[in-house]
Image: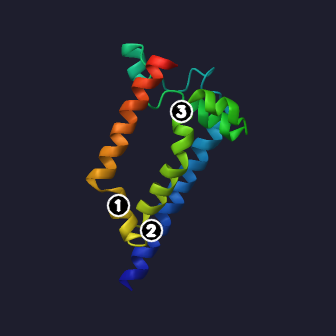
Amino acid sequence: MIKNVFTSLRLRRVAMVGALAAAIATLYYIFDPGESRWAPRCIVRSLTGLDCPGCGSQRMIHALLHGDFRSAWDANPFLLCVSPLILAWLWIEADPSTYPRMSRALNSPGFIGGVLMTLIVWTILRNILL
């Protein structure tokens, strides 16, 4: 009985997140964040003039939804490359008990430190080279 309640709650949560993701994807498909006044602007770029690791992510999502991989690459190549890893992480963390070893590995201090170092290096490189 209790397991059915948790399964039901999990399914509702997954359905709600899926519906929210579909609504956001629809908005990004319809509106081009590069031209829309409704799209949020990067606070880091507004304050410093420098690109943060996520700068261009909205334009990248819009381009991907339209099948334009070249524009997606131009908007944020780093995020484009790590998107499959982010989606896998979200999938695993939705129910960590399904893949407990993978969940522990993804939440280990070493992995998190590696991700942070990669983000720092990407931020420096994109502001110096690009």
Using the numbered discs, state the Cα–Cα distance from disc 1 to disc 2 in whole angstroms: 23 Å
Q: Position of residue 82 (x, y in %)?
A: 51, 44
Q: Which residue is mark 3?
A: 57
Q: CA distance from mark 2 to mark 3?
A: 29 Å
Which mark is in front, 1 or 3?
A: 1
Mark 2 residue type = Arg
Q: Residue at x 43, y 81 (%)?
A: 4
Local crowd size for mark 1, using a 10 Å CA cut-off: few (<14), some (14–19), many (≥20): few
Tell me the SS state at disc 2: helix
Q: Which residue does the numbered mark 1 point to in the structure image?
A: 105
Q: Select label 1 or label 2 by which is in front.
A: 1
Q: Quick one: label 2, few (<14), some, or many (20+) residues within 10 Å?
A: some
Q: Name the amino acid, label 3.
A: Ser
Q: Reading the chain from its start, which is encountered first: label 2 or label 3?
A: 2
Q: Helix, strand or loop at disc 1?
A: helix
Q: Residues within 10 Å of mark 3 (few under 14, many from 20)?
A: some
**Relative to 97, does residue 123 appear above or below in the rendering?**
above
Residue where numbered disc 2 is placed? 10
User: Colour scheme of this structure image?
Assistant: rainbow
Number of marks: 3
